[in-house]
Image (spheres, rainbow, N blue to C red):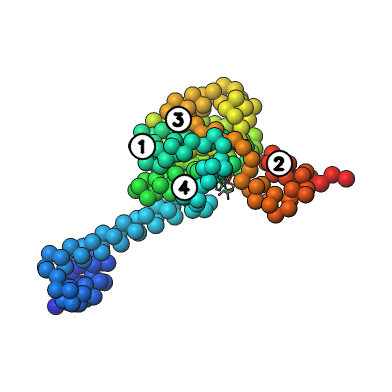
Amino acid sequence: MVELTAALLCELGLNQASARLEAAIEAAMAKEESYLEFLSGLLAHETDARRQRSYDTRLKMAALPHHKGLGDFDFDFAKGVDKKTVTELSHLGFVSSATNICFLGPPGVGKTHLAVALCLEAIAGGHSVYFTTMAKMAADLSGVPTPAKVRKYLGPKVLVIDEIGYRPLDGRAGSTFFEVVSERYETGSIICSSNKSFTEWGSLLGDAVLATAILDRLLHHCVVVNIRGESYRLKDRKRQGIAAHPEVADAIEKGVVYTPGN
Ligand code: ADP
Ligand code: MG
């Protein structure tokens, strides 16, 4: 009878409940559970497992570079980051209103960390997320875009475009960026991060008109977080003694490649 019931549960697609059936019956007998308690316990097991699986899938699809959350972020260290604003964002109103978020600031101040932390909240809240960098997205969409590729950038409720500004964007990359921002306008959030101020985006793209068109759409519904202060990475390295090499520390701070002099 147990085997038949387990097979029927499987046929209905309730695989987790099926696998747990025998143990659940034993536990119910030991605890003298009512029929209702037994049934709801078994169904809860199935739904919990499904929720977990769907969370795991969303987390994997998001391709996050790490999983540091808001709990790991030191708001006292970061200058210009209003904890209240970030906490409000973590309640995910920005996802349903398709509001964008821009983190601006020099290297190492926590732009990627905050973007990832908000992604983790969005994933836990049941939303689809995709994390990429400007350079990766531009390379990926440089050829003839296939529908699958386009879906990758337009499908998720939240798209992170990290590291805008570390490299100049050629005409092709600029128009790709424009297409993505335009297509997502008022339909899906973009979280972006840049080490360049918006006034520098014209020279970054080598096209002031295109930069204006992108910023016009990006900033219409947008929360801008300007982070100042020194690099968190540098803080740790200073402690480890790199401060003894100010030219290296300076290069890290400026986000440029250190080239040893003579
Ligand atoms: P950015 O994207 O601005 O260059 P990151 O977010 O990559 O900087 O931060 C660099 C490193 O320092 C990461 O390991 C990040 O977790 C850490 N970090 C930066 N700011 C903070 C902060 N305020 N509290 C805790 N960790 C931080
Ligand atoms: Mg970063």
Other residues around mark 1 within 10 Å, as few (<14) / some (14–19) / many (≥20): few
**Mark 4 residue element:** helix
Tell me which amino acid carries mark 1. Answer: Gly
Q: Nearer the viewer, residue 145 or 53?
A: 53
Other residues around mark 4 within 10 Å, as few (<14) / some (14–19) / many (≥20): many
- For residue 169, above or below residue 67: above
- For residue 181, above or below residue 66: above
- For residue 249, above or below residue 102: below
Residue 58 in view of the camera: yes
Q: Are marks 2 and 3 in contact (CB under 8 Å)?
A: no
**Mark 3 residue element:** strand
Tell me which amino acid carries mark 3. Answer: Cys
Tell me which amino acid carries mark 4. Answer: Leu
Residue 30 lies in what quarter of the image?
bottom left
Q: Earlier in the sequence, mark 1 or mark 4?
A: 4
**Label 1 vs label 4, nearer the camera:** 4
Q: Residue 256 bears which disc, if any?
A: 2
Q: Name the residue under label 3.
A: 222
Residue 258 lies in what quarter of the image?
top right
Label 1 to label 2: alpha-carbon separation: 36 Å
Q: Which residue is drawn at 52% across and 53% down?
A: 66
Q: In which quarter of the image is the C terminus?
A: top right
**Mark 1 residue element:** helix
Q: Mark 4 points at which residue?
A: 70
**Label 4 vs label 2, nearer the camera:** 4
Q: Does the residue labelled 3 lie within 8 Å of ligand 1?
A: no
Residue 142 in view of the camera: no
Label 1 to label 4: alpha-carbon separation: 17 Å
Tell me which amino acid carries mark 2. Answer: Val
Seen in the image, is 25 located left or right of residue 127? Answer: left
